[in-house]
Amino acid sequence: MMLGYHRTDYGPLSNEDEVMDALRRSAASPGEYVVPHAKDSSMLKDPAYQEKAKKGPVAFITIMGPWSPSMGKQLTQWFVYAVVVAVFAAYVASRALGPGAAYLEVFRFVGTTTFVAYAVGLWQDSIWYGKPWGTTAKNTLDGLIYALLTAGFFGWLWPGM
């Protein structure tokens, strides 16, 4: 949210306290949930399930435990993720390019690889889970920014001959 354009990604519920109380009463442990829930694909044909789905709402819910606004854990996980992405990008670029490769050649391979890692996988959230395409577009922009920065550093630090 540093740039502010993600501020509108998640809207409030008009009855937030009631929804939070209902989730607490459900005693659902942290995890991923869907309502209505089908235990298996045969249940999708059940008229009762179909009626629930048609009546709505359909929701994909991620429940987390109590949380504090400190983002230390998430930033540490993000750093590890970025290192893993960089390792894969380094592998791809090192197989395609040798020492002394031109800056733009390195930039192209690393930028493409890291863009796919940071952004393309997020598109499935809109396809399968109904996340608004506007949010996915903003996340894709973030992925493009991360990819450009990573590609720039790789191009700058690529070993010479």
Image: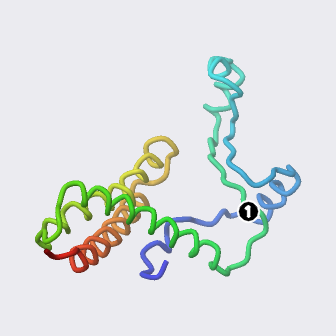
Can you give x and y, in whole percent of width and height, for residue 158 in the image?
23, 74
Q: Residue at x 48, y 49 (%)?
A: 125
Q: Nearer the viewer, residue 144 or 26?
A: 144
- Left or right, residue 30 beside residue 62: right
Name the quarter where the C terminus is drawn. bottom left
Can you give x and y, in whole percent of width and height, for residue 61 in the image?
66, 50
| Residue furthest out toward the front | 161
Can you give x and y, in whole percent of width and height, for residue 110 in the image?
26, 63
Q: Quadrant of residue 150?
A: bottom left
Q: Tell me, what colour scheme is on the image? A: rainbow
Can you give x and y, in whole percent of width and height, for residue 47 in the image?
68, 18
Circle 1 packing at 10 Å, graded few (<14), some (14-19), many (20+), is few
Q: Residue at x 85, y 49 (%)?
A: 26
Amino acid residing under circle 1: Asn
Kind of element beneath mark 1: loop
Q: Quadrant of residue 49?
A: top right
Q: How many marks?
A: 1
Q: Nearer the viewer, residue 113 or 132?
A: 113
Q: Residue at x 45, y 62 (%)?
A: 84
> What residue sits right under mark 1 in the picture?
15
Above or below: residue 116 compared with residue 138: above
Q: Residue at x 20, y 68 (%)?
A: 107
- Left or right, residue 85 beside residue 19: left
